[in-house]
């Protein structure tokens, strides 16, 4: 009987209508934002600007997938910005200072990210440290290690083929880094909707005790989710390094806030158990379009932070009202 209940609970949504409902509000908001910006500035609707927006959201888009998984199980990850910086510095040091081949340097960078996520997962599950505190500690530790690697100095210059991943537009449209973001989003969507392991995330976020009684190893799920979140943050760091042709330990400051904002704006509940990749993609686009549009309108960067903060509050408020009426 318990198994039946958890099987029902672990489904992302009961019908296609319900799947669309959770992302309807953010989608309407995105369309309204695009309409306003298209009227306010002539440059917004150009193909070049649209491609620039896609290039600018690649890092955020990849990180937001991992954050979606974390929030779905009712957790939070404040360390993704620091793990991004750690991944960049490990890659830069192994490639440019240790002289290792670039592909091997990327492997080491992702491995360092995975270790960071594993440590967080162990703190949360085995030592019962609240996710907020565990990831806050990792945020400080990872940033410190990133600075220690080169004593706070940046590393500049990577192979041409690596930097071209973020520059060369295949078919004259999309860069390899954008294709990578889309592939990550698609893989995550398939995982959540068509794999039993993906439905486990909803079950754990909805009711961890019921999920445990149904036979789900909630500790393994939690550890796995934090490892995936860290690896995707590390992958986003590699993408950012390709765009900048450099790495520095100060990279990623504030990225955790943008990432959480994109996921929450996309309709994923901070209490866990509901949401999805479709809404996260819309949330990422809202953040990207909003920043791009405000830049086109010459809005002060400080005022941009205020506006995005207001948008986050409105999104959380709307989600709370929707849950109360459900």
Image: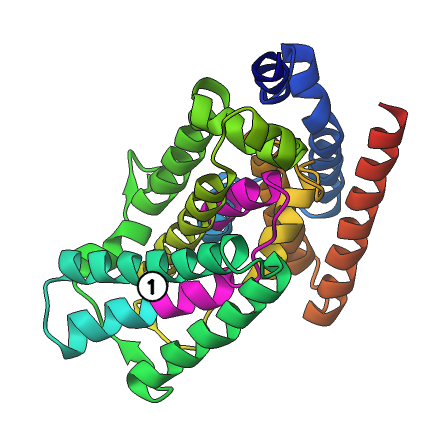
Quarter residue 96 falls in: bottom left
Task: Reply above or below: 133 against 166.
Answer: below
Closer-to-camera residue (153/75):
75
Task: Reply above or below: 91 against 213.
Answer: below
Type of secondary structure dominating the magenta stretch? helix
Quarter residue 13 falls in: top right
Query: Would residue 59 appear left or right of 291 to someone viewing this image?
Result: left
Give the image's coloring scheme: rainbow
Q: Point out the stretch of residues depicted in magenta.
A: 61-87
Query: Would residue 266 appear left or right of 82 to someone viewing this image?
Result: right
Name the residue that disc number 1 marks.
Answer: 241
Closer-to-camera residue (37/246):
246
Label 1 crowd (10 A; few <14 / some 14-19 / many >=20): many
**Picture quarter with the N terminus:** top right
Q: Secondary structure at mark 1?
A: helix
Could you tell me residue 58's position as x and y percent? 45, 48
Could you tell me residue 140's position as x and y percent? 51, 75
Quarter residue 255 falls in: bottom right
Q: Is residue 227 visible?
A: yes
Could you tell me residue 301's position as x and y percent? 68, 69
As for residue 270 lying within the magenta part, the answer is: no
Could you tell me residue 260's position as x and y percent? 62, 52
Q: Is residue 252 visible?
A: no
- Residue at x-position 72% and y-position 71%: 302
- Residue at x-position 60% and y-position 20%: 6
Query: Would residue 215 appear left or right of 172 to someone viewing this image?
Result: right
Task: Reply above or below: 323 against 48.
Answer: above
């Amino acid at each position: 009987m318990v198994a039946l209940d958890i099987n029902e609970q672990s489904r992302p949504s009961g019908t296609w209508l319900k799947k669309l409902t959770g992302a309807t509000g953010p989608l309407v908001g995105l369309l309204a934002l695009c309409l306003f910006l298209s009227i306010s500035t002539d440059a917004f609707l150009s193909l070049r600007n649209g491609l620039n927006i896609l290039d600018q959201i690649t890092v955020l888009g990849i990180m937001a997938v991992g954050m979606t998984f974390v929030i779905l199980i009712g957790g939070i990850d404040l360390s993704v910005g620091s793990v991004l910086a750690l991944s960049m510095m490990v890659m830069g040091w192994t490639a440019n200072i240790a002289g290792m081949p670039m592909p091997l340097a990327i492997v080491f960078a992702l491995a360092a990210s995975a270790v960071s996520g594993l440590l967080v997962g162990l703190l949360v599950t085995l030592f019962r440290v609240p996710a907020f505190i565990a990831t806050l500690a990792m945020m400080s530790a990872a940033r410190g290690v990133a600075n220690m690697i080169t004593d706070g100095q940046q590393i500049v210059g990577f192979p041409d083929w690596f930097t071209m991943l973020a520059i060369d537009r295949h078919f004259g449209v999309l860069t390899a880094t954008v294709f990578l973001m889309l592939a990550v989003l698609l893989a995550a969507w398939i995982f959540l909707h068509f794999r039993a392991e993906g439905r486990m995330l909803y079950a754990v976020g909805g009711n961890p005790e019921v999920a445990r009684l149904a036979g789900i190893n909630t500790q393994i799920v939690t550890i796995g989710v934090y490892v995936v979140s860290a690896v995707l943050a590390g992958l986003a760091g590699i993408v950012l390094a390709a765009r900048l042709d450099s790495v520095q330990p100060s990279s990623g400051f504030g990225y955790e806030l943008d990432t959480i904002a994109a996921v929450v704006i996309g309709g994923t509940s901070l209490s866990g158990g509901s949401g999805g990749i479709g809404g996260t993609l819309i949330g990422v686009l809202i953040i990207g379009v909003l920043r791009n549009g405000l830049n086109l309108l010459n809005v002060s960067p400080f005022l941009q932070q205020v506006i995005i903060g207001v948008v986050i509050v409105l999104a959380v408020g709307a989600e709370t009202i929707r849950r109360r009426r459900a």
